[in-house]
Structure formats: C-alpha cells, structure tokens
C-alpha cells in the first residue's frame, strides 16, 4: 500500500470511528454544524469570490448568484425543516399483521465521499455537504485541482470550521481520486463528466457502495415557431454565457424552426450586447476557459460550422466569444460531446416532431429547454426525457432548492436539493413492532382456520 493510500485510509477510518461514536446523530449537533457552515460562507465570502475570479474570471456578482447564494438557500431550507425530516413516520399496518405497529426511521448512511468538479467548485462541493451534515453523516470532500485558488480556500475554510474526523477536505489530482476510491465508503456523491462517472461507478461496485452521479450531457434547447424570439434569445444567451458556458446544464445545442433562424441570430447578438457590452472580451461578467486544453478543444469546434454570431477567440486569454454556430448536421464533432464552452451549435427543423425525434435519438440529457406555447411544451415534455427542464427559460430549475436536481440515464442517477439531499445521505429503515402480550396463531404452522386467513391476505 502506498503512502498516499495509507494516509487516506487513516482519515477515512478516523471518520468511521467518529460516526460510530454517535456524535453526529443528535438534531442539535446537525443544526449547529449547518449554522457553522452558513457562518463560514459569510466569513469566507470575499476570499472565495477572489479565488473564483482568479481561476475562472467569474465576477463577484456571478459568484454570489450561482454559487454562494444557492448554498445559503440550501442550508436555510434544511435548518427550517430538519427536525420534521428526522422525525419517525408512522404508517398504517394491515389487519393481517395485527396487533403490530409500523414506522419508518431515517438514519444516516455513515461516512460519505463527495467529489466535486471545477466549473462550480463552491456550489457543487458544499451543496451535497449540506445534505451529508443534515443527514448525520461524516464526509470526506475532494476539491478539484483545475481551480487551485478556489480549492485552497475551500480546504482552509473547511479545515478551520470542522473537526477533520467529521468533515475532511482534500485536494490533489487523479492519484488522490484513486486512493479515495480504493476505500470503502457508505455513499459516493460524484459530480463530473459521464466518462469519469464510469470510473466512479466501477470503483463503487467493488464495495457495493451506493452512488449519486451528477453528470452532464448535451442539453438541447428547442425554439418553436410560436416562441417569443426576443425573450428566447435573451434567456438562451444568458444561460449560455454564465461561467463562459462551463455549466453542466448550459444550453448545449439549439434546434430552431427554420423560419426564425435569421431573426434569432439578430436577437441573440442584441442580447449579448445588452449582457456584456460592445466588447465582450472586456466584460467583467464574461468568464474564461478553465485551461489551455479546454480552450483548444472548444476553439476546435469553430471549424465545424459557420458562425452567425461571434467566433472571435484569443488563446493568450483563454477567451472565446459567445458564438452561435450554424452546423450542417448532427454528425459534426461539436454535436458529439458536451461542449462546456460558449459555442452554441444551431440546427433548423420544419416540424416540431423533427426536433423531438432528434433529442430522443440521443442519450438522455441533464436538462432540456423549450421555448414555445403551453400546448407545445406539454407535447415536448411528454415525449422526451431529461434530468430537469425549463419552459421558456434556461438554467433556473437549479435555483429552486424545493425541486429535485439530478440526471437520468447517461446524465446521472439520484437526486438532491432540499429534502432529497437529506434523503440521499440517509437510509429509510422499516420497523414493525409487535406486542408480546397477544400472539395470534394464524401465521403459525399447521395454518389452522386457513380459509379465514386466506380471506384476510
């Protein structure tokens, strides 16, 4: 066993011992830890915002809007409802089981591993952690090496806020991931690409460890002939330029009625000007690609079609302008994998059924966005599948901590946010209690009065 594996194993075992002590179980303990995390977010807000700017050119406003405020909302939701979520639930018991009573207990799974991505490194690390704390688990949290400044701040914040036997933050590259995945956890919560999701699931299978996989995929955006084009263009431009398109639920490609193509391109350009000014490269609210490798990959897609809007790029700044890219078909490289950048390929259709068929023929995405009439939206939602969806909007379903967030099929498994975060890190335990004072003979061999018993079953 390597020195790294021994180090990681010792940390995990220390957490297991702490969990077995029962320290994390009481309501007051969980509530106190949630409050500590909420206070830490306020104390560390400026360092986190500065680190997000350093690593992703993410403005303080966008950092608070898309990262810190979402975590704060999640914590406050848990603080409001935790006592009720923890309460045992009585359920009815059928007559055939008399004189028994039934209830459901919600208990923490144990020690969890949370692996976060780099694109929303604060939100996607701390939001699952809220669920782990709320459920009464201990947790090892793994930060992303792609955003070193953010990861350093997060590790310092968590280290100074929590006992490492309870919550332990660890940085590093894939060797650290490998050492962590060698360990037996009670749950692995992974956010990242589908390809890495395969690796996580394979490692979890060796220990029969349950997983929550929040992956990604190519989230389609459909604009029908009945859409408000100006509104659609504005909301799609906003959703696509958040974090420079490096969002797992960003609109990944656009399917638009052929009659609206030119109008949409005009409105899209207007929306970009409103959002980011005449010179987008100088906008304080438009990010940069996370690395040279990411820039080269996304920039290569510009050769797959004709830019209707944008197309400018500068490798020295890792800058790619928001680009509306008309492509000839769905077979070009930009249509084969999640883009994770500010390039939006465009394909046209004549009938809405063509767009639906195009989406259904591909792996199930993490999000689907539709712009059009209410009746059309019902048809599209009924005949497609995605982790989440917005009608006449983009991105906003993640902002409501009261609705589930998660993938389906290739885009992931399991959900979280709100009560579902609590439940993701919990086991629901069935308990049947039977009085010893009465012992009805019907269930025992040799099954006397079987005719009566059979009618009760």
Image: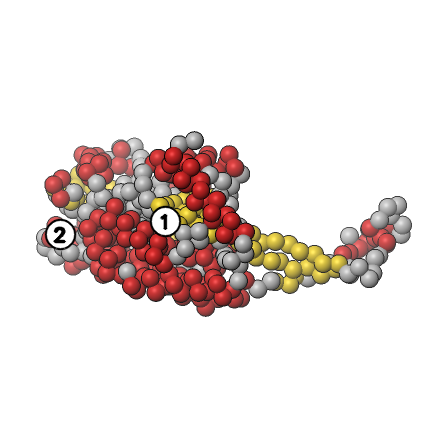
Q: Report the side of 21 relative to 377 (left or right).
A: right
Q: Report the residue marked by disc 2.
A: 280
Pinpoint residue 171: horizontal percent, then vertical percent: 32, 44
Disc 1, SS: strand
Position above or below: 36 against 340: below
Q: Report the residue marked by disc 1.
A: 169
Q: Report the side of 14 relative to 272 (left or right).
A: right
The crowd level at tag 1 (other Cα within 10 Å; few <14, some 14-19, many 20+) is many
Farthest-out residue, bottom: 80
Farthest-out residue, top: 1
Q: Residue at x 70, y 56 (%)?
A: 432
Position above or below: 345 against 39: above
How many numbered marks appear? 2
* Nearest the eye: 342 or 308: 342
Q: Residue at x 31, y 35 (%)?
A: 336
Q: Residue at x 13, y 52 (%)?
A: 280
The color scheme shown is secondary structure
- Residue 65 visible (yes or no): no
Q: Residue at x 53, y 66 (%)?
A: 84
Residue 96: mark: none
Closer to the chain start, of discs 1 and 2, is 1
Which quadrant, please, contains the N terminus? top left
Q: Report the side of 431 relative to 213 (left or right).
A: right
Position above or below: 294 against 241: above
Position above or below: 423 against 182: below
The crowd level at tag 2 (other Cα within 10 Å; few <14, some 14-19, many 20+) is many
* Nearest the eye: 255 or 302: 302
- Residue 16 visible (yes or no): yes
Pinpoint residue 302: horizontal percent, then vertical percent: 18, 37
Q: Report the side of 126 relative to 426 (left or right).
A: left
């Amino acid at each position: 066993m390597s020195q790294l594996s021994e180090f990681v194993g010792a940390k995990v075992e220390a957490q297991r011992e702490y969990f077995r002590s029962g320290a994390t179980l009481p309501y007051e303990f969980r509530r106190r830890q949630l409050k500590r995390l909420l206070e830490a977010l306020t104390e560390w807000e400026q360092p986190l915002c500065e680190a997000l700017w350093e690593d992703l050119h993410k403005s303080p406003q966008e950092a608070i809007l898309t990262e810190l405020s979402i975590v704060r909302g999640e914590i406050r939701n848990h603080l409001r409802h935790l006592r009720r979520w923890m309460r045992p639930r009585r359920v009815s018991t059928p007559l055939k089981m008399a004189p028994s009573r039934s209830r459901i207990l919600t208990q923490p799974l144990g020690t969890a591993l949370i692996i976060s991505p780099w694109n929303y490194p604060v939100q996607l690390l701390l939001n699952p952690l809220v669920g782990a704390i709320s459920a009464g688990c201990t947790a090892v949290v793994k930060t992303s090496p792609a955003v070193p400044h953010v990861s350093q701040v997060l590790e310092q914040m968590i280290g100074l806020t929590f006992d490492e036997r309870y919550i332990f933050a660890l940085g590093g590259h894939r060797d650290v991931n490998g050492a962590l995945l060698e360990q037996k956890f009670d749950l692995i919560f992974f956010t990242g690409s589908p390809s890495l999701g395969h690796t996580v699931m394979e490692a979890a299978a060796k220990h029969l460890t349950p997983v929550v996989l929040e992956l990604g995929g190519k989230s389609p955006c459909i604009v029908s002939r009945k859409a408000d084009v100006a509104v659609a263009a504005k909301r799609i431009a906003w959703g696509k330029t958040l974090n420079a398109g490096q969002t797992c639920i960003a609109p990944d490609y656009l399917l638009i009625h052929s009659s609206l193509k030119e109008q949409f391109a005009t409105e899209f350009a207007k929306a970009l000007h409103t959002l980011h000014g005449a010179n987008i490269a100088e906008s304080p609210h438009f990010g940069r690609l996370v690395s040279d490798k990411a820039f080269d990959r996304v920039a290569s897609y510009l050769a797959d079609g004709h830019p209707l809007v944008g197309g400018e790029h500068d490798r020295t700044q890792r800058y790619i302008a928001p680009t509306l890219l008309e492509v000839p078909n769905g077979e070009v490289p930009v249509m084969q994998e999640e883009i994770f950048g500010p390039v939006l390929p465009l394909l046209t259709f004549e009938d809405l059924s063509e767009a639906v068929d195009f989406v259904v023929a591909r792996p199930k995405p993490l999000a689907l966005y539709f712009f059009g009439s209410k009746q059309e939206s019902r048809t599209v939602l009924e005949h497609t599948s995605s982790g989440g969806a917005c009608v006449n909007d983009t991105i906003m379903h993640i902002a409501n901590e009261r609705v589930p967030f998660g993938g389906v099929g290739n885009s992931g498994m399991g959900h979280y946010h709100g009560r579902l975060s609590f439940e993701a890190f919990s086991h629901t335990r069935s308990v049947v209690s039977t009085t010893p004072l009465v012992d009805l003979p019907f269930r025992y061999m040799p099954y006397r009065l079987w005719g009566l018993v059979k009618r009760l079953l």
